[in-house]
Amino acid sequence: MRSMLERERSFTPVTASVVDRHVLARGSQEKVINNITRKDREERPDLVVLTPTCTSSILQEDLKNFVHRASLNSKSDVLLADVNHYRVNELQAADKTLLQIVRFYLDKYKNTDKLSKLKTPKPSVNIIGSVGLGFHNHHDMVELKRLFLDLGIDVNLIIPEGITVEELCKITQAWFNFVPYKEIGLLTAQYLQSQYNLPFINIIPMGTIQISSCIKAIQNLLFSMGQKVDYSKYIDRQTRFISQSAWFSRSIDCQNLTGKKAVVFGDATHASAITRILSSEMSIRVIWSGTYCLNESDWFKNQVKNYCDQVVITDDHTLVADLIVKADPNAIFGTQMERHVGKRISVPCGVISSPVHIQNFPLSYRPFLGYEGTNQIADLVYNSFTLGMEDHLLEFFGGHDTKQVSEMNLSSENSFSWSREAKEELAKIPGFVRNRVKKNTERFACANSLDKITVQVMYKAKESQSL
């Protein structure tokens, strides 16, 4: 599955170990150690990482001892991922494990005098945080390479994707580190700054405004290092001529989106950036913006508080579904979970964050970062809204928009019984406003304690809307 999602030409080798009642009774120590030493002989890896599991926690197994014993008979380095999986999510675990690996090897290379001490002749950067199965990460890295090339900055290392542990000895050659995502890489960058005086920039280059802020921060950093660079003309040229999103935001097509309502939900990086783009660059009202990264709640609130009506911090997908139904947005921007919610209530959804599906690992070039990323996001936003003429044409030519009225209700609100005549009347309403009329009528019925909706109730609801 991993190989398929990452579009790799060869499958990632997998070894499965059966844990039966006999193993559980006497513990899995010998089995784990034997498997590590066996794979060490067969695959000859540089590094073996042992991760805790629910079973190991229940059995209260001494995994540090497992690692110690396995390392005695292995040529590869053996590390225990030092994370409490009951207290952190997978993104936090990845962030902490990356730091642990980088710190282990830098200490090792420093003790053996293999750590590079000289900087590269011209400005260079380490990009930290591109991980396997990340949302459009491979595309983003190509775009970042192009951006740094334009700025006259060499890419020293991309960590962790695409390098070996031996190459980590070159990490200190870079002039600075760049962390494009909030979830993974920041701990490593902070460690490198405190221990090796290696500065970092962690402004997310998503959207024209944030890209400009990011490039200006890089310019200021290089200027403080004695490099007289001026990227103002580059920013102006890219914004006006290369990126189409700045022009699009002033076009009549984008003006048709003014006043449209949207909700945003995803990881902290993408949800915050998309919220700012919708509000400040496309004049779309964000009813609420949320993230499931509970550990980033303070940062996230600070990022989006001026760009949305409400901030939601939760990892409860049922609550998110109910909030979407109550908000009644014109479009949703979220994960595949929110896309399924949107399908059930006939609201279009643009996927902007993990968790994702195979379709979110496109073969074509679709970055979210950099200037090409602004074009991709503009297309995604515009195509996610169902425009009135589209629904008229679909209804006229017998498209997917049927006249059958859905009685589905995902929220905790009351469900109403619609009379046959009311359903027929509702079916006569054009598709692009039908769902809104249905919701407004049900709200009127709820406010007036009515259990059944008739044609007369529909007319009264309509009259109350015009008062």
Image (cartoon, grey):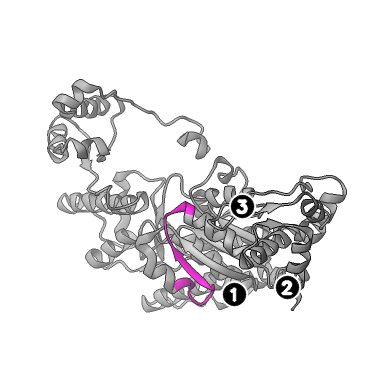
Residue 72 at x, y percent in the picture: 12, 33
Residue 441 at x, y percent in the picture: 70, 63
- Are dots 3 and 1 in contact, CB under 8 Å? no
What is the number of the mark on residue 342? 3
Mark 2 or 3: in front is: 2
Please indicate, yes or no, whether residue 291 appears anywhere in the rendered image: yes
Q: Which residue carries the number 2 mark?
A: 465
What is the number of the mark on residue 280? 1
Q: Residue 309 in magenta?
A: yes
Separation of disc 2 and disc 3 at Cα? 25 Å
Please indicate, yes or no, whether residue 218 appears anywhere in the rendered image: no
Quadrant of image for the C terminus: bottom right
Q: Residue 467 in magenta?
A: no
Q: Earlier in the sequence, mark 2 or mark 3?
A: 3
Left or right of residue 98: residue 449: right
Separation of disc 3 and disc 1 at Cα? 24 Å
For the point 42% across and 31% down, the residue is 12
- Are dots 2 and 3 in contact, CB under 8 Å? no
Secondary structure category for the residue under label 3: helix
54 relative to 350, above or below = above
Left or right of residue 338: residue 167: left
First to last magenta residue range:
303-318
For the point 60% across and 42% down, the residue is 363
Amino acid at circle 2: Gln
What crowding class fits label 2: few (fewer than 14 Cα within 10 Å), some (14-19), or many (20 or more)?
few
Res 64 quadrant in image = top left
For the point 58% across and 57% down, the residue is 414
Q: Residue furthest right?
A: 396
